[in-house]
Image: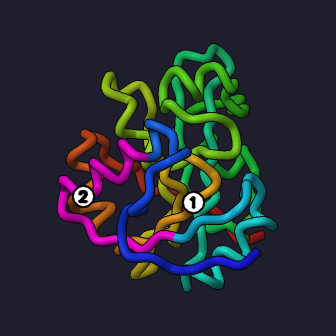
């Protein structure tokens, strides 16, 4: 993969999806500065390591979860290299039997497809059906990496801009969780 780092949105929008462009529109309207790189499909953490090197930031693992009854939905942001065990999270959020949410629920609630889950998808959760969970280690980093709702581009922005500008703008308050490194 030969990737370049760009400031902001792409100049050429041909072939870009509406949800990706909506992400740039929102970030720009909020005055959030970001770096961007374009790449092939990156839908696994392994594929993200090379992207991490270009961005100079660790891309978060974004997990779309739900309870057994499918009445509560969660978006979990955690360091990409940290292992995830549902039992470590369930007790902290008082929700037994967590599992991965369906692609249909992901599309309906966040406007994204599997492999493209991102905190940016919360802009599409206008009814606040998805609870944002953020591992405390993510908040310790100066910069944050994520997809702009598609897995063929990646963004780098200040973590403070995410928590102080983006999340209030999309009306989501993070619940901070502590997940062990094992």
- Which residue is nearer to you in this view: 89 or 28? 28
* Residue 162 in view in this figure: yes
Q: Which residue does the image show at 38% across and 48% down from the upper left? A: 23
Magenta stretch, residue numbers: 21-36
Q: Earlier in the sequence, mark 1 or mark 2?
A: 2
Question: Looking at the image, how many numbered discs can be counted on the residues?
Answer: 2
Q: Which mark is residue 153?
A: 1
Q: CA distance from mark 1 to mark 2?
A: 16 Å
Judging by the rendered image, the residue that carries numbered circle 2 is: 28
Residue 80, image x and y in percent? 67, 66
Residue 29, image x and y in percent? 18, 53
Q: How is the image coloured?
A: rainbow
Looking at the rendered image, the quarter that the N terminus falls into is bottom right
Q: Which mark is residue 90?
A: none
Task: Indicate yes or no whether the magenta region holds residue 25.
Answer: yes
118 shown above or below 66: below
Residue 67, image x and y in percent? 63, 25
Q: Which residue does the image show at 71% across and 33% down from the upper left? A: 100
| 32 on left or right of 132 | left
Q: Quadrant of residue 45?
A: bottom right
Looking at the rendered image, the quarter that the C terminus falls into is bottom right
């Amino acid at each position: 993969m030969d990737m370049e780092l760009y400031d902001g949105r792409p100049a050429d929008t041909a072939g870009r999806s509406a949800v990706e462009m909506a992400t740039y529109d929102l970030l720009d309207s909020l005055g959030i500065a970001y770096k961007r790189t374009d790449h092939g499909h990156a839908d696994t953490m392994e594929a993200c390591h090379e992207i991490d090197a270009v961005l100079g930031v660790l891309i978060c693992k974004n997990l779309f979860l739900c309870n057994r009854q499918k009445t509560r939905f969660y978006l979990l942001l955690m360091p990409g290299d940290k292992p995830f065990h549902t039992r470590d999270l369930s007790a902290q959020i008082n929700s037994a039997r967590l599992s991965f949410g369906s692609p249909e629920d992901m599309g309906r609630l966040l406007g994204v497809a599997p492999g493209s889950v991102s905190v940016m998808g919360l802009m599409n959760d206008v009814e606040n059906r998805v609870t944002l969970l953020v591992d405390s280690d993510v908040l310790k980093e100066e910069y944050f990496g994520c997809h702009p709702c598609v897995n063929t581009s990646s963004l780098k922005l200040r973590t403070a801009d995410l928590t102080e500008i983006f999340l209030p703008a999309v009306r989501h308050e993070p619940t901070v969780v502590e997940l062990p490194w094992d």
